[in-house]
Image (tube, rainbow, N blue to C red):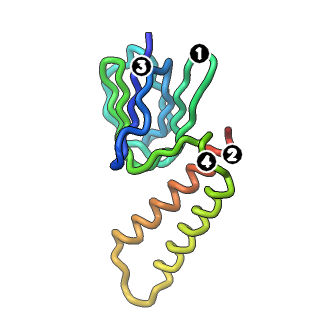
Amino acid sequence: MALLLKIVTPTGITLNKEVMSVVLPASDGEIEILPGHLPLLTIIQPGELVAKNANSQECFAIDFGFAMISNDNVFVLTDESLNIDETDLHEIEEAEKRAQKALEEARNKREALDPAEIEKLDAKVKYQMAKKLAKIRH
């Protein structure tokens, strides 16, 4: 028995594959989905999604979003998804620095900044950190 995993971003489907299990960064901690899992709808946080098969696994850094599990289908709807094996640690570190700098500049501005804008910048920093941690772990 297998699961059908689909990762969908605003730019399209980034993964559509059968896997044996999926580990997701849910809002209340990591969860592992196995075939036969009860239906579930959960919020996902920036972090690492691991798609496991018998002898291999693929790791993805994902951003905020939602996951729906139903009838051995795992649908992940997220703002961004990146296959960790297809990216360079140096690139991730540079992107993290840029995101941190933009957030600090926004917080240090004298005039009032829109709280939603600061929240977006903070989310970018969290996603970059999730990519870095996932890359280092694998």
The amino acid sitting under disc 3 is: Leu
Cβ atoms under marks 2 and 1 closer than 8 Å:
no
Look at the numbered disc 4 and give the secondary structure of its residue: loop
Image location of residue 128, percent across then percent down: 55, 56
Asked which secondary structure carries label 1, the reply is loop
Residue underneath mark 2: 136
**How many angstroms separate mark 3 from mark 1 (CA)?**
13 Å
Q: Nearer the viewer, residue 27 or 33?
A: 33
Q: Residue at x 63, y 18 (%)?
A: 55
| Crowding near the residue tagged with mark 1, few <14, some 14–19, many ≥20 C-alpha atoms within 10 Å | few
Left or right: 70 with respect to 91? left
* Percent x, y of residue 69: 34, 27
Query: Does label 3 or label 4 sit earlier along the sequence?
Result: 3
State how far apart marks 1 and 4 are (Cα): 24 Å
> Residue 43, how many percent across, how many down?
36, 42
Residue at the disc numbered 4: 87
